[in-house]
Image: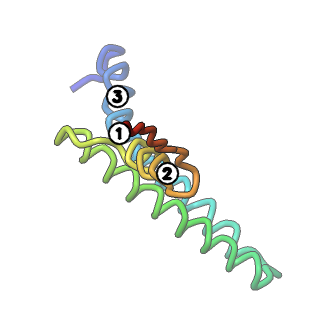
Amino acid sequence: MPISTSRIKDVWPWLAEAQYAWVSVVVICVALATSLRQHTTESVIRLTGLVLQLLGIGTIIWGISETRALFGHPSFASKTKAWLSRFPLLRRNIVLAVGSATQ
């Protein structure tokens, strides 16, 4: 079966469907290349691990926010803003009662 140019052009959209997998492969390769070099210090290995953990936590937060949006719930940022706006020491609701009395 000969390979035509149209079939080759169809490869790029097919590869693009797995864009998140490619990004994760690149991140892991960079982390391995950084930590497996000769004379790599312990601090570099620890920082590489920290970056990988932070990327993992960011991925989880992103997934949760997308799931919340699918179910029609407010985003984490809007809930945080609403919560901070209710901070008791910044609220300036001054209630002034005025009354008069006659005999």
Q: Find residue 27 and report its horizontal and vertical position in percent.
A: 55, 57
The residue lying at 27 percent from left, 23 percent from top is 2
The N terminus sits in image quarter:
top left
Residue 31, which numbered label?
Answer: none
Which comes before the other along the chain, label 1 or label 2?
2
Q: Helix or strand or loop: what does disc 2 sit on?
A: helix
Depth check: 53 or 69 in front?
A: 69
Q: Is residue 20 left or right of residue 49?
A: left
Depth check: 2 or 71 in front?
A: 71
The residue lying at 40 percent from left, 55 percent from top is 61
Which comes before the other along the chain, label 2 or label 3?
3
Q: Could you classify mark 1 by the number of other residues whose Cα lies within 10 Å: few (under 14), some (14-19), or many (20 or more)? A: few
Q: Find residue 49 and report its horizontal and vertical position in percent.
A: 60, 74
Which comes before the other along the chain, label 3 or label 1?
3
Tell me the residue that label 3 is attached to: 11
Mark 2–mark 3 CB contact (< 8 Å): no
**Number of the front mark, 2 or 3:** 2
The residue lying at 52 percent from left, 60 percent from top is 55
Tell me the residue that label 1 is attached to: 103
Tell me the residue that label 2 is attached to: 84
The C terminus sits in image quarter:
top left
Q: Helix or strand or loop: what does disc 1 sit on?
A: loop
**Number of the front mark, 1 or 2:** 1
State whether residue 73 is above or below residue 83: above
Depth check: 99 or 46 in front?
A: 99
Q: Helix or strand or loop: what does disc 3 sit on?
A: helix
Cα distance, mark 3 to mark 1? 93 Å
Cα distance, mark 2 to mark 3? 49 Å
Amino acid on which the number 2 mark rests in the picture: Leu
Q: Could you classify mark 2 by the number of other residues whose Cα lies within 10 Å: few (under 14), some (14-19), or many (20 or more)? A: few
Q: Please tell me in which quadrant of the rendered image residue 100 appears.
A: top left
